[in-house]
Image: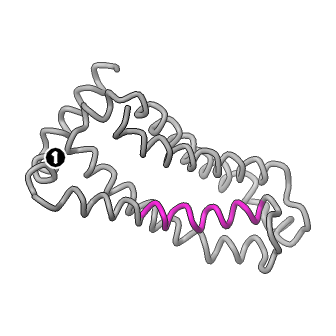
Amino acid sequence: MPDWLNSLLKLLQSSALGETVRGAEYLYPVLEAGHILGIALLVGPAFTFDLQLLGVGPRVVSVTSAARNLLPVSHIGFAIAAITGIALLSAQATVVAGTGAAPWKFGLLILACLNVLVFHHGIYRRVHEWTDVAVTPVAARIGAGVSLTAWTGVILAGRLLAYT
């Protein structure tokens, strides 16, 4: 691990946040529960949207209607998962970073976030051209596949943090 990253992790771990999370009796499990809730709010709507882009199931609404109704919930879930995830990490940042699953979790998390940016600043900018088509463009389907794969990997690697 690079020295700058190790220093940053030590700073997070020794912060008031890290001290508080380690010191408060029930805070860690409450944060874990909040993290799971955030993940559910993130991936439930995102997976529903991705599956629609892939053509799985009946198309009841247009892509733009699905995005307008599902993605704001995903954004709230992401915010909750990020805030609780940083708080959880602060309790044992150097220990967590030393696990075999950590590079996978954080690498896939970066991939998932980059995929969102590429999708919304790429193919989705022309959604008005394809919102009601029977088969979405290949780029949209690739983005959906990357999303499903990356977020599933983030969740799996996150669970493995405790075991590796």
Whether residue 118 is situated above or below residue 42 in the rendered picture: above
Locate the C terminus and report the quarter of the image it occupies: top left
Q: Residue furthest front?
A: 163
* Most foreground residue, 88 or 129: 88
- Rendered location of residue 25, percent (x, y): 10, 58
**SS for callout 1:** helix
Kindly identify the residue that appears in the image at 83 percent across and 63 percent down: 55
Of 137 and 45, which appears nearest the observer?
45
Q: Residue at x 89, y 61 (%)?
A: 135
Residue 19 percent coordinates (x, y)? 10, 47
Left or right: 87 as drawn, with respect to 40: left
The answer to if 42 sits in the magenta stretch is yes
Most distant residue in the right direction: 134
From the image, which quarter does the N terminus lie in? top left
**60 in the magenta segment:** no
Kindly identify the amino acid type of the residue bearing the numbered disc 1.
Answer: Gly
On screen, residue 103 versus residue 65, left or right, reads left
Give the residue drawn at x 61%, y 63%: 46
Q: Position of residue 132 (x, y in %)?
A: 86, 72
The image quadrant of residue 127 is bottom right
Label 1: few (<14), some (14–19) or many (≥20) C-alpha neighbours in 10 Å: many
Residue indicated by mark 1 = 18
Left or right placement of residue 121 versus residue 9 in this view: right
In the rendered view, tell whether residue 2 sits above or below residue 79.
above
Give the overall secondary structure of the magenta segment: helix
Say how the picture is coloured: one colour
Give the extent of the magenta segment.
Answer: 38-53
- The quarter of the picture where residue 5 lies is top left
- 164 or 146: which is nearer to us? 164
Number of numbered markers:
1
* Residue 48 on image: x %, y %: 66, 67
